[in-house]
Amino acid sequence: MADVLVHKPVLLEEVLENLITDKSGTYLDATVGYGGHSLGILNRLNPEGKLIGTDRDQEALSVAKKNLEEFGDRVVLAQVSFSQLEDFLRQQNISQISGFLFDIGMGSWQIETEERGFSYLKPGPLDMRMDRKQSLTAYDIVNRYSEEKLVWIFKNYGEERFAKKIAKALKNTKSEIRTTSDLRKMVEKVVRTNVIKTLARVFQALRIEVNQELEELKKGIETAVKFLNPQGRLAIISYHSLEDRIVKESFRELAKGCKCPPTLPVCICGAKPELEILNKKPIVATEKEKKLNPKSRSAKLRVGVKI
């Protein structure tokens, strides 16, 4: 896998234009992947500018290290989840960052690697872990969670209307669901219409549960705002409605400041706005990029500025 070095970063020019305000600053790419966005950031910075690249996926970090090695000590790479970012930055004695980038989509290398178990199109074990050191896998969820819990996951993380039907079938099966192919066959038995869309939603829901993606995203946003320089930028690329809703609502709350109940006539909490929303509507890919990079079709970039 480490030989695969090709990666097309989504919305690269739009990210660079909106993220970089200080060319001598320190930027943090919290989803460094193979280093596509990080390479663009480093090329745009002055020689004094630095980049911290973090990711949950150690295999991706190994490739990023090769792709960014020309920048030497201007780059620090580490296996860190969003929820671990605050502790990591404090351990590194870093108190301020010029800009944070979160590209929270799946890497194409993850989807294409059969043994990772992310795709219903690829035969492989039911794994779906971003960090392969963690214990919980999609196999555990499918085979050991209760029917009620599976219904909740498919409904809330997959927005799947056949959630009850699928969960019931999984619990009634006489043999364990061990592989992506086993799960696909089970879903295909239960759902007769638009099965491909259902498969996509079921696999998405399981992946989100395995990696606690939505909770991680919330913690990542919280840490980014805490460590941003005044006027520093927070750029987040999301790919589906659940992620984008969290980003949009988090930005709105951070821009509002006051956390008092709406029934109170005046603010008594004293909370001040922490973020200015740079773009009221998300930035999306050009038609040209959508043709060249299909992954960009659903991408939405939202940017906030630290007050």
Image (cartoon, rainbow, N blue to C red):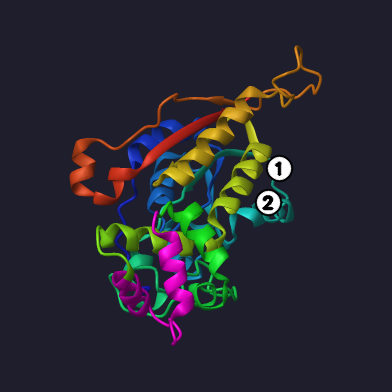
Query: What amino acid is labelled 1 in the image?
Result: Ser
Residue at the far bottom in the pictured view: 175
* Predominant SS of the magenta segment: helix
| x then y, percent, for residue 180 | 36, 76
In this picture, residue 41 sits left or right of residue 81: left
Q: Are marks 1 and 2 in contact (CB under 8 Å)?
A: yes
Q: Is residue 33 magenta?
A: no
Left or right: where 184 falls relative to 163: left
Dot 2 falls on a residue whose secondary structure is helix
Residue 187 in magenta stretch? yes
Using the image, determine if residue 190 lies above or below residue 125. Answer: above
Q: Is residue 135 above or below residue 256?
A: below
The kind of residue on which mark 2 rests is: Leu
Q: Nearer the viewer, residue 82 or 172?
A: 172
Which residue is denoted by mark 2 in the rendering?
A: 89
Tell me, yes or no, if residue 284 can be seen here.
yes
Quarter residue 297 falls in = top left
The reply, left or right, for residue 272 in relation to residue 111 is right
Q: Name the residue located 29 percent from the left edge and 61 percent from the top edge.
A: 6
Dot 1 lies on which element?
Answer: loop
The spot of residue 101 in percent (x, y) is 50, 44
In the picture, which quadrant includes the C terminus?
Answer: top right
Question: Label 1: which residue?
Answer: 95
Q: Which mark is residue 184?
A: none
Decide which of tag 1 and tag 2 comes sooner along the chain: 2
Residue range of the region highlighted in magenta in the rendering: 161-189
At x 53% / y 72%, what residue is drawn?
141
Residue under the point 43% across and 51% down: 159
